[in-house]
Amino acid sequence: MSAKRGGTTYYYRDYTDDFVESARQDDALPEDFHWIHRNPFYRLISALLYGVAVVFSLIYIRLILHVRVENRKVLKAAGKTGCFLYGNHTQPMGDVFGPVLNCFPGRISAIASVSNQGIPVIGKLLPMLGALFIPDSMGRMKEFMEAVRYHVEKKRYIVIYPEAHVWPWCTFIRPFPATAFRFPVLYNVPAFCMTTTYQQRKHGGKPKIVVYIDGPFLADSGKSKREQQMELHDKIFACMQSRSQASDCEYIHYQKREQDEMKNPADARR
């Protein structure tokens, strides 16, 4: 990428650094938290809120961020089976609402960190909108996995950001683990990826946002589950890296800083 560099540089020590922290970054799941709700009133409120989210997504994604989506049509068939949709994590709000619009008229769920409860206004509503918070103890993992299966059986588009941490306007794909790909292997559904890129615009200070959707990606069922996970990881990582080359400008430049040079966490941004 021959990129036009922006005026802001964020320094990082490793790929687990957080540049966007919520007010409840270290929250744990409450003891009475449940992933599956069968109460009709809860489901009705959830459906109504999701309808509002669709309308808000149309306004925010199309009219405020001006996102253009390429190849959205490949997701159509996934509405018959359910799927897992992997993306690079570069927009705090856009990554919440973009998939809602990309997968419409299907409904999304999203595997997410419990720290997202701290997002202003919508944080507490995220479970009703389909967020599947990752449990903070192995004892609750069984219930979480049952919830993931439940949403697959509902033919949902389940969104995962395997980079885990939001790096705003980042133009490169950060390494992510193959364990994030156990879900499509376990539930035998296709995987897709959506790669957000940043391209120069003629007018305005921020880059143009173009999202590319690719897939379906399938693993060789003759291989072990571990080998299938790695195969999906490699295919999707390579595709996202290739698509990321469409980025030709940097609104924020990310530069690695050696640990002994980082004297103060406040120095992470400059």
Image: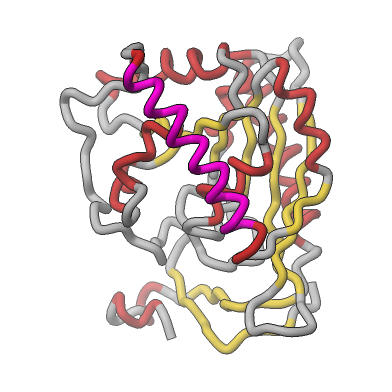
Using residue 117 as the reference point, say whether residue 98 is left or right of it.
right
* The quarter of the displayed image where residue 268 is located: bottom left
Spot occupied by residue 257 in the image (x, y as percentages of width and height): 46, 76
Spot occupied by residue 140 in the image (x, y as percentages of width and height): 28, 20
Q: Residue at x 57, y 77 (%)?
A: 252
Using residue 201 as the reference point, say whether residue 50 is left or right of it.
left
Q: How is the image coloured?
A: secondary structure
Q: Residue at x 74, y 84 (%)?
A: 203
Q: What segment is highlighted magenta in the picture?
A: 41-61
Nearest the camera: 63 or 259?
63
Say if residue 62 shows up in the picture. Answer: yes
* Quarter that holds the N terminus: bottom right
Q: Is residue 263 highlighted in magenta?
A: no
Q: Is residue 89 above or below residue 220?
A: below
Q: Residue at x 68, y 42 (%)?
A: 102
* The quarter of the displayed image where residue 185 is located: top right
Could you tell me what secondary structure mostly forms the magenta stretch? helix
Q: Residue furthest left?
A: 31
Nearest the camera: 217 or 126?
126
Spot occupied by residue 8 in the image (x, y as percentages of width and height): 53, 84
Q: Is residue 179 above or below residue 247?
A: above
